[in-house]
Amino acid sequence: MTNKEFAAKLKSIATDYKTLYVMGCFGAPMTAANKKRYCNNHTYNKQASRQKMINAASADTFGFDCVCLIKGVLWGWNGNASKTYGGAGYAVNGVPDIGADTMITKCSGISTDFSKIEVGEAVWLEGHIGVYIGDGLAVECSPKWENKVQITACNCNKSGYNRRNWTKHGKLPYITYVKESTAAPTPPSKKSVDEIAREVIRGAWGNGADRKNRLTAAGYDYSAVQKRVNELCSNPANSTSKKSVDEIAREVIRGAWGNGADRKNRLTAAGYDYSAVQSRVNALLK
């Protein structure tokens, strides 16, 4: 499992499932049998207030505590409410049954500097553990605040989230950490000089200094493009497949060929009879 997959599963539990803080529980649904089991498995759960919460939970509510949330996911929890432990096994996949304070010692790259923390790293303070999911957020299961698996702000203030100040973080040994790709995005393939020259003739790249600046900014050789423009304009028959006078007139009406002298120059450069086009424009606008 990669760090990103791990973080995504934890986030999904926090946002897509009903959960409750239950000490020693690694994802068991709150069926009648499991309520009986967990109301008597730990001194914490034997408190009257906690037993009341457990017994009031619906059967599609899954119980977790902080470290058991991590172990449950690593043990294969998948939200199957028909399974005793929600689909998780016990101490499987090479992940031992250890507590929060022991789990942080198993991590690599343990640090108190949170400036370069990576997605999927364990975040820890004495007696409590969670997982960083990115964007300044962590997933933790706690009786504090919402009394369930919840997303909290990691050592920072973020609107809409409770803040938890963790002490340390480190990479868990049970998952694979994948680095973000640093490769530069592939630039879009360039058009040929001939294609760009034809676009210039159609007016797509502006005029004068504006044309030169735009072509240069897009990575084209202005001199080569302009040379091809001159070649095409010297032999209008080669400049482009000719459209009918009616088609061009309708393009003129839509504003595709500019106005005034600019329009006349562009139509003439593209090999069209300006007078014929203008005559058709006038007829269409009557």
Image (spheres, helix red, strand yellow):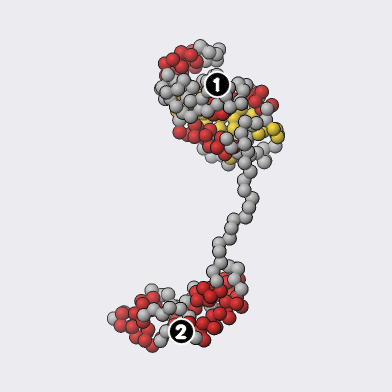
Quadrant in the picture for the C terminus: bottom left
Q: Relative to the observer, which residue lies in front, 226 or 11?
A: 226
Figure quadrant of residue 81: top left
> How many neighbours does mark 1 have within 10 angstroms: few (below 14), some (14-19), or many (20 or more)?
some
- Kind of residue at badge 1: Tyr
Figure quadrant of residue 168: top right
Residue 145 place in picture, x, y as percent? 52, 27
Tell me the SS state at disc 2: helix
Is 200 situated above or below 59? below
Is 51 situated above or below 149? above
- Kind of residue at badge 2: Ala
Would residue 285 be visible to someone looking at this image? Answer: yes
Q: Is residue 279 left or right of residue 146?
A: left
The answer to which of marks 2 and 1 sits earlier in the sequence is 1
* Residue 90 image label: 1
Please name the residue shown 60% across and 77% down the image: 224
Please name the residue shown 33% across and 83% down the image: 280
Give the residue number, with chain letter if any, for mark 2: 237
Q: Is residue 278 left or right of residue 23?
A: left
- Report the Cα–Cα distance between label 2 and label 1: 79 Å
Discs 2, 1 touching: Cβ within 8 Å = no
Residue 130 place in picture, x, y as percent? 59, 30
Please name the residue shown 58% across and 67% down the image: 218
Q: Relative to the observer, which residue lies in front, 64 or 84?
A: 84
